[in-house]
Amino acid sequence: EEVNEDEFRRFMIRFHEKVKYLDDVESNIDPKDVFEKFSNMKCNKSVEKHYESLCRYFPIIDEIMDSSLLTTIERESIPNIVISEYNKVLSKASNGNEVIEMIVENIFQTYKDEFQYSNTTLKTYFKILVYWSIYECDIFNEVI
């Protein structure tokens, strides 16, 4: 699915306004190659292909996250939400595909009423954020 970059940028700004701030989550990060993570988490090739198609939107997230308009807590809010959901679903999933889908679904269920996007578009936006978190080494450092 093609994502309108301007609309995604607006979504990111609105999402920052809507998120429920979580307590800081400490993480011991050992950066790894993204595709090594996908392999360790037993993700199928479709996940890798989807990641490759959506990672082109990461600069939009980085631009907003690096903005001086955001406070430190605002910059940490989205990663903290993804990390929190990741920790909730990790033991319930048998592979990385399920982990990603469960995280996206949980975030979607929490915030779906806050945005005026189709379910498909909103889930795609949340999936971009999850993939960005993988890239940033916020999640997927474990081997399933």
Image (tube, rainbow, N blue to C red):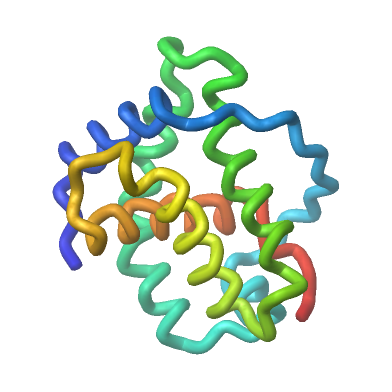
* Camera-side residue of 47 and 107: 107
Query: Which residue is pictured at 54% across the width and 13% down the height?
Result: 71
Query: Which residue is pictured at 33% across the width and 52% down the height?
Result: 125
* Camera-side residue of 42 and 112: 112
**Which residue lies most toward the front here?**
113
The answer to whether 66 is drawn above or below residue 123 in the figure is above
Query: Which residue is pictured at 41% across the width and 85% down the height?
Result: 46
The answer to whether 122 is drawn above or below residue 52 in the figure is above
Q: Position of residue 128 (x, y in %)?
A: 39, 55
Q: Is residue 132 left or right of residue 22?
A: left
Question: Which of the 4 image quarters holds residue 50?
Answer: bottom left
Q: Is residue 30 left or right of residue 54?
A: right
Q: How many numbered marks appear?
A: 0
Q: Position of residue 60 (x, y in %)?
A: 33, 38
The answer to whether 112 is drawn above or below residue 99 in the figure is above
Q: Position of residue 34 (x, y in %)?
A: 59, 66
Query: Which residue is pictured at 64% across the width and 85% down the height?
Result: 42
Q: Is residue 138 left or right of residue 68?
A: right
Quadrant containing the C terminus in the rendered view: bottom right
Q: Position of residue 29 (x, y in %)?
A: 79, 49
Quadrant containing the N terminus in the rendered view: bottom left
Question: Which of the 4 image quarters holds residue 76?
Answer: top right
Q: Is residue 27 left or right of residue 95?
A: right
